Image (cartoon, rainbow, N blue to C red):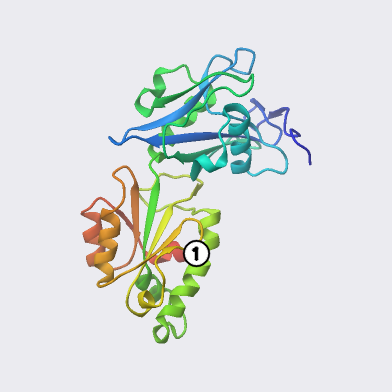
Amino acid sequence: MAAKDGDGWALCAQGHRHWGLYGATGLLAVHHTRDGMPYILLQERASWSHHGGTWGLPGGARDSHEDAITGALREAREEADLTADLVRIQGLYVDDHGGWSFHTVIAEAECLLEAAPANGESTDLRWVAADEVTAKKLHPGFAHTWPAIRPALSPLVVVLDMANIIGARAEHGWWRDRAGAAGRLLDELLPLAGAGLGHPPEGVPALARWFPRIIAVLEGAAARNSAPGPRGAGITVAPAEGSGDDAIVDAVRGTRPWEKVLVVTADRELRERVKALGALVAGPRWLLGQL
């Protein structure tokens, strides 16, 4: 394993030549303005490079020891001087050509970050409104994947009806120690939040992995024995002061207008209440099947 050991040409199953012996990866930084319009950071490729003069994402070949996210963040640092602390990873899209793939790492930026070419691989970096992307002369690979990526620019927020999920899990004796059952479920959710969610339910764009903000709403004894606030990366515990259903509805109302919200519950009345607010719903089995 060595730095840049992924540099080189590879042939995919479709007979096309691609840069990156172990595949390639790129960072799609996205920022939503107050009116809800997503802006993405595009790179104009240097004329000497493959498909020079086209617009795409900061990115390049993955090294043998890198996962897609690590590689994309490295490339963004090398090409645009963007560091990992400036963005939050929210999703991963994979364009698989058979034996070679390009991973697009979608990451949320809190503002229109300053970016400028940091090496000779690009001539310009510019924030472009999503509706104006296709007006650019795009890199062929990015042009191919953009229609699938465009619907996935909105960050995903998953709101968990913990009481309902714990009941569906039917852990032995859970009703005698609801706080303990909630704690055990949260502990199991932590690595899932870090690795990302897969197999999205209907209505959620089909990314390979989602890295949502997760809000775990607790009620009753579980709420009384849990401290509110972050519990590991990506998970926030929200004890309900009263009705758990009302707290879940408030959590949905508290999200930003451009965020996509998914509520995990089997409660029919609650499902109708959050759907009226524009949220998507999934049953506990969807979540439990990923643990």
- x and y, in percent, of residue 256 in the image: 31, 46
Residue receiving disc 1 = 189
- x and y, in percent, of residue 128 in the image: 41, 25
Quadrant in which residue 72 is drawn: top right
Q: Is residue 133 above or below residue 280?
A: above
Q: Is residue 91 visible?
A: no
- For mark 1, give the secondary structure: helix
**Residue nearest the viewer, comparing 10 with 265:** 265
Q: What amino acid is labelled 1 in the image? A: Leu
Badge 1: residue crowd in 10 Å (few <14, some 14–19, many ≥20): many
Q: Is residue 266 visible?
A: yes
Quadrant in which residue 230 is drawn: bottom left
At x 39%, y 66%, the residue is 228
- x and y, in percent, of residue 258 in the image: 32, 42
Q: Is residue 137 above or below residue 168?
A: above
Q: Is residue 288 above or below residue 72?
A: below
